[in-house]
Image (tube, grey):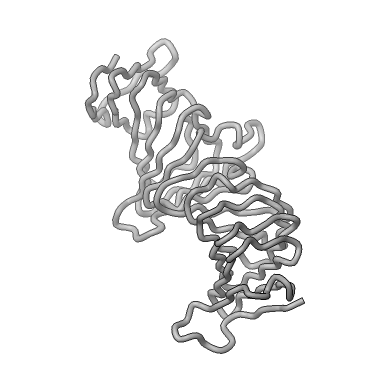
Amino acid sequence: EIEGANFIDLTGATLPTGSDDSINITGGAEIKVPFGGLDGVFVTGDGSVQADLEGTETEFDTTTIDVPLQLNVPSAGVTLTGFTGFDPDQPLTLVGDESVSAPGPVFDITGIPGSGFAPVAFLPSSVELDNVDFTLTAAQADGLVVTGASEATVRTGVSTNTDLSAIGVPLEVEASPLGTDFGGDLPSGQPITFSGEGTISLNGNAIPAGAVVSVAANTTLDVTGGTLGAGVSFIMEDNTSELTITGAQADGTTIEDTVDPPATGEGTVNLV
């Protein structure tokens, strides 16, 4: 039992494991635990837990930590390739090393395998970012609430109808190398970048009104199968950026490059 609104550093302690030896936090206390001690630790109550990641982790199970969890991401970032689980009823905060400039170190969960356990079922209730580039698959991002001050990168498959409307940070949608048929919902009020060495084609969906959409290098964005909200504008980031758009969609739409003053030949616009 840990009581009181205090911060308690338990990184040098050996923590109990098993449901018969749970840690109950009351009074809003926050405890810091060794990352290696997270697996198998049962934590309950109204406090919170944080741990420092080392950058060498490939998997961990925090489904038994039934309080808000904060993971501190090192400058080298973290890429997970094994089973990893979070309590789906609790929020996760990711805090990146301040020495890494925005969007911060990468926290990549795209490699979590789907065999045996469905990775979507073990995602947190929400994710708050503090200088972390959160990288996830379209299935993992579907309906997930993401807030904070950084960005989220969503890697898509060849056909994706993912709901990304709950992402409240700048969003990067990365195409499959084979091309992506994208019919998902996009967030309002956030800059959106389409990237990846392939073609992303809208399919019956809309780019929200007022969105500033960037097309990255070696990427083709085809918006002819979707609709554009009022005031949508496009930025061509490279001379290999390509936009396919109808004449009606292009009428009154701002399309510019990233060079100041503008350069001739920065990107390609296909008018169909």
Residue 21: name its quadrant: top left
Extreme residue toward the top, this view: 20
Instruction: State whether residue 70 is above or below residue 162.
Output: above
Nearer-the-camera pick, 108 or 139: 139
Nearer-the-camera pick, 201 or 224: 224
Residue 123: name its quadrant: top right
Instruction: State whether residue 26 is above or below residue 204.
Output: above
Q: Horizontally, is 200 left or right of 27 in the view?
A: right
Nearer-the-camera pick, 42 or 151: 151
Q: Position of residue 156 (x, y in %)?
A: 65, 54
Q: Horizontally, is 159 left or right of 29 in the view?
A: right
Nearer-the-camera pick, 180 or 76: 180
Instruction: Point out the image quarter for the N terminus.
Output: top left
Q: Position of residue 135 (x, y in %)?
A: 52, 51
Q: Residue at x 54, y 65 (%)?
A: 212
Q: Residue at x 22, y 26 (%)?
A: 6
Instruction: Point out the image quarter for the C terminus.
Output: bottom right
Q: Position of residue 12 (x, y in %)?
A: 25, 29
Q: Position of residue 232 (x, y in %)?
A: 59, 65
Q: Horizontally, is 254 left or right of 272 in the view?
A: left
- Total number of numbered labels? 0
Q: Horizontally, is 272 left or right of 265 in the view?
A: right
Instruction: State whether residue 29 is above or below residue 217.
Output: above
Q: Residue at x 29, y 31 (%)?
A: 32
Q: Residue at x 44, y 14 (%)?
A: 19
